[in-house]
Image: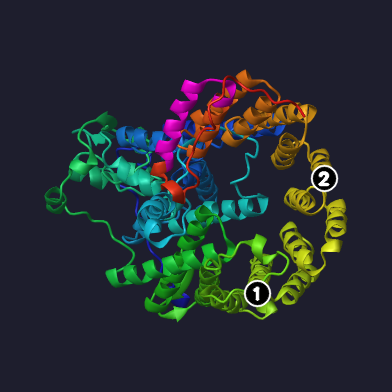
């Protein structure tokens, strides 16, 4: 025995003779092919982005996360179609998409290869309860929104009416739902290197990927699997090269095939088998292996935690996820990877304290009961991690309570910021006071709150200003925003909040104030649109149109100023303005072709210009996009009636009435109807 507790062990030669030369598994032929396929996919993704940058419009992201918009708002995206096809193919062929098409797999494989260059092959972390985290994340992302909208919200409120199904195939803002560079780099480090280094190859897929939460159970019904024949000599080469952490040799011996849902069909095991005993073939699926068959051939897998530890560390994983996700509003894929790594660090610190000997790869943490410097550092870091996440969690809880009471304050801003506003005596005012108190607790510690990070400073300031306004404390609201501007600088949200307060405090200064801010920040389209509406309501239609034109001149490719100008021109102009409105609306439809509101506006502009034939074409296209919108159906009926197509108008009115009744009748709005009969089609006079 060497000094300091180090043990010198004799290295025995391998007695496996099935492999080439020294008995080691031969190099997989599939590794290079898979790497090439993944690189081609990355290249196509780059081409997609470049095409968007050059053209300005492109196919919407082919990304499973876009499915969230489908289940939440009924918008069928390219990502949703892709995700459905990927799950469907997984139910037939297994998890080929994960192994051969996922960019995160490429990242993990690349990081694993770099670690292998320095002689490290991380041991896979094996947990039973944490395996359920991906499924839980998947249910939260894709099932919970549906359950809330259709099962919970009808009883509790809080969800808007179901808008019906629509399509979103192309986009102008390709990067709208993706994180920026500042988030991309940490994602590469955490979900690439750190998850591989701590959790083993495919550690992110195993414990953090929400898409894997659906792919894993779908894989269990797939008839295409890795299967074995009688030539197998149980050499273990298949397990040695598997980067999905599957005990291949054990599974094929027990069941004649691989049943582990973590198998990503990388085919390395098939490639290295010295006797060609493994192959991919059709047959019975993994789900056909019943409990009796599994019990008759028990697995020899050793897990890293006892069941009490599993329960405790599953709770720690959930706490870390909620703290990290809530504090920074991080993308869920990054937050889940960070939580998984954090859980492993706390678990390893616990093992350092519990066990007599512990190590991290080749670094000793504890030997013969004596804590090494690296082990002490890990324990301290784990303690700080738990303490900091608990601190964050406390601030998150305060923010959640503030949001809850804030949501109960339902007074329209148009009433609050109107002349002569009187604070109503209602429970909402008590809710506003309570929300303000909790926002104070959720604020950054430097601002007198509990949070150790300043992530929500601007948002909290804006919400506090709104609540203070709702209870009539306009001067306090202005002071809140002014103080935040002084500390953080002016932002568009702060400017919009300040402008609304200025309307109440000194209306004569509002327009000049808008001008000063917009001269400095001409790209703030929401603030400019607010100025347009202010001028329309308080000054004149001409001044509002003038400001709308200024917005189009400042940002000619932005939809918001184009749409606002088109609406003003069609509602308040003459024949020339109606034609201009139609031209502008056609321009917006080139940017966003499947927008029913734009098509409706185009139909109105064409009808006012006397072009009833093309107006009907535009309105019919709008109705085809949202056939369940009773208001749109009613407008179409009125257009047909005005054109003189009385029978078609009555048929469209009947459908509008049916949808109106389904939407709640009088609660949804005035009953749809047609004007009194006329002798023939009418035309606008142009006056």
- The image shows residue 111 at horizontal and vertical percentages of 53, 48
Q: Which picture quadrant has residue 368? A: bottom left
First of labels 2, 1 by sequence position: 1
Seen from the viewer's position, the closer of residues 659 and 212 is: 659
Seen from the viewer's position, the closer of residues 258 and 623 is: 623
Res 444 label = 1
Task: Write down the region rendered in magenta.
Answer: 641-660
In the image, residue 305 lies in the stretch drawn in magenta: no
Q: Which picture quadrant has residue 577? A: top right
Q: Residue at x 67, y 81 (%)?
A: 448
Seen from the viewer's position, the closer of residues 440 and 311 is: 440
Is 350 placed left or right of 621 in the picture?
left
- The image shows residue 626 at horizontal and vertical percentages of 49, 34
Q: Is residue 108 above or below residue 10?
A: above
- The image shows residue 637 at horizontal and vertical percentages of 52, 29
Task: Answer whether residue 159 is visible to the viewer in this image.
Answer: yes
Q: Residue at x 60, y 46 (%)?
A: 178
CA separation in Å, label 2 and label 1: 38 Å
What colour scheme does the image use? rainbow
Res 547 label = 2
Task: Answer whether residue 362 is visible to the viewer in this image.
Answer: no
């Amino acid at each position: 025995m060497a000094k300091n507790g180090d043990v010198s062990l004799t290295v025995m030669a391998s007695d496996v003779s099935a492999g080439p030369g020294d008995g080691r598994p031969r190099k997989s032929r599939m590794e290079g092919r898979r790497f090439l396929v993944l690189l081609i996919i990355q290249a196509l993704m780059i081409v997609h982005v470049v095409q968007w940058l050059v053209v300005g419009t492109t196919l919407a992201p082919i990304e499973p996360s876009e499915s969230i918009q489908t289940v939440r708002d009924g918008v069928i995206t390219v990502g949703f179609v892709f995700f459905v096809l990927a799950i469907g193919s997984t139910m037939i062929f297994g998890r080929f998409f994960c192994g051969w098409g996922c960019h995160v797999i490429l990242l993990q494989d690349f990081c694993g290869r770099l670690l292998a260059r320095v002689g490290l092959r991380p041991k896979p972390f094996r947990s039973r309860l944490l395996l359920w985290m991906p499924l839980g994340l998947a249910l939260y992302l894709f099932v919970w929104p549906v359950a809330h909208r259709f099962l919970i919200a009808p009883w509790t409120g809080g969800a808007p009416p179901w808008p019906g199904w629509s399509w979103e195939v192309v986009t102008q803002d390709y990067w709208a739902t993706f994180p920026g560079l500042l988030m991309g780099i940490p994602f590469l480090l955490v979900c690439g290197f750190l998850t591989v280094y701590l959790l083993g190859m495919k550690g992110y897929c195993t414990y953090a990927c929400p898409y894997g939460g659906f792919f894993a159970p779908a894989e269990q019904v797939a008839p295409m699997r890795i299967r074995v024949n009688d030539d197998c000599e149980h050499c273990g080469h298949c397990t040695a090269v598997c980067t999905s952490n599957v005990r291949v040799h054990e599974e094929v011996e027990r069941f004649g095939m691989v049943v582990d849902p973590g198998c990503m069909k990388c085919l390395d095991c098939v490639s290295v088998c010295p006797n060609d005993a493994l192959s991919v073939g059709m047959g019975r699926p993994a789900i056909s292996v019943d409990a009796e068959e599994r019990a008759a051939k028990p697995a020899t897998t050793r897990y890293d935690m006892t069941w009490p530890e599993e329960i405790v560390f599953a709770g720690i994983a959930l706490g870390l996820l909620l703290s990290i996700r809530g504090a920074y509003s991080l993308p869920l894929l990054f937050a889940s990877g960070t939580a998984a790594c954090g859980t492993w660090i706390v678990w390893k610190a616990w093992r350092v304290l519990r066990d007599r000997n512990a190590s991290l790869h080749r670094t000793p943490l504890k030997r013969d009961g004596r804590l090494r410097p690296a082990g002490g550092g890990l324990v301290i870091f784990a303690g700080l991690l738990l303490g900091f996440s608990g601190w964050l969690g406390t601030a998150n809880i305060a923010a959640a309570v503030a949001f809850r009471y804030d949501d109960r304050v339902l007074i329209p801003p148009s009433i609050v910021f109107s002349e002569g506003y009187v604070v109503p005596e209602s429970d909402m005012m008590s809710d506003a006071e309570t929300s303000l108190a909790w926002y104070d607790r959720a604020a950054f510690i430097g601002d007198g709150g509990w949070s150790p990070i300043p992530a929500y400073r601007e948002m909290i300031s804006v919400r506090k200003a709104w609540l203070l306004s709702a209870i009539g404390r306009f001067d306090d609201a202005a002071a809140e925003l002014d103080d935040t501007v002084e500390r953080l600088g002016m932002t568009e949200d702060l400017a919009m909040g300040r402008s609304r307060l200025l309307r109440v405090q000194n209306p004569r200064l509002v327009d000049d104030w808008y001008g000063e801010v917009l001269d400095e920040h001409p790209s703030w389209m929401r603030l400019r649109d607010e100025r347009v509406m202010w001028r329309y309501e308080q000054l004149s239609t001409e001044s509002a149109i003038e400001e709308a034109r200024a917005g189009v001149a400042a940002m000619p490719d932005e939809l918001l100023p184009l749409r606002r100008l088109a609406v003003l021109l069609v509602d308040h102009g003459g024949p020339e303005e109606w034609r201009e409105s139609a031209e502008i609306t056609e321009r917006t439809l080139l940017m966003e072709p499947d927008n029913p509101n734009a098509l409706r506006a185009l139909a109105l502009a064409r009808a006012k210009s006397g072009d009833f034939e093309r107006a009907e074409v535009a309105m019919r296209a709008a109705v085809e996009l949202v056939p369940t919108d009773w208001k749109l159906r009613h407008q179409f009926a009125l257009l047909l009636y005005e054109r003189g197509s009385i029978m078609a108008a009555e048929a469209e009115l009947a459908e509008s009435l049916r949808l109106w009744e389904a939407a709640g009748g009088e609660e949804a709005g005035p009953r749809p109807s047609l004007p009194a009969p006329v002798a023939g089609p009418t035309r606008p006079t142009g006056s």
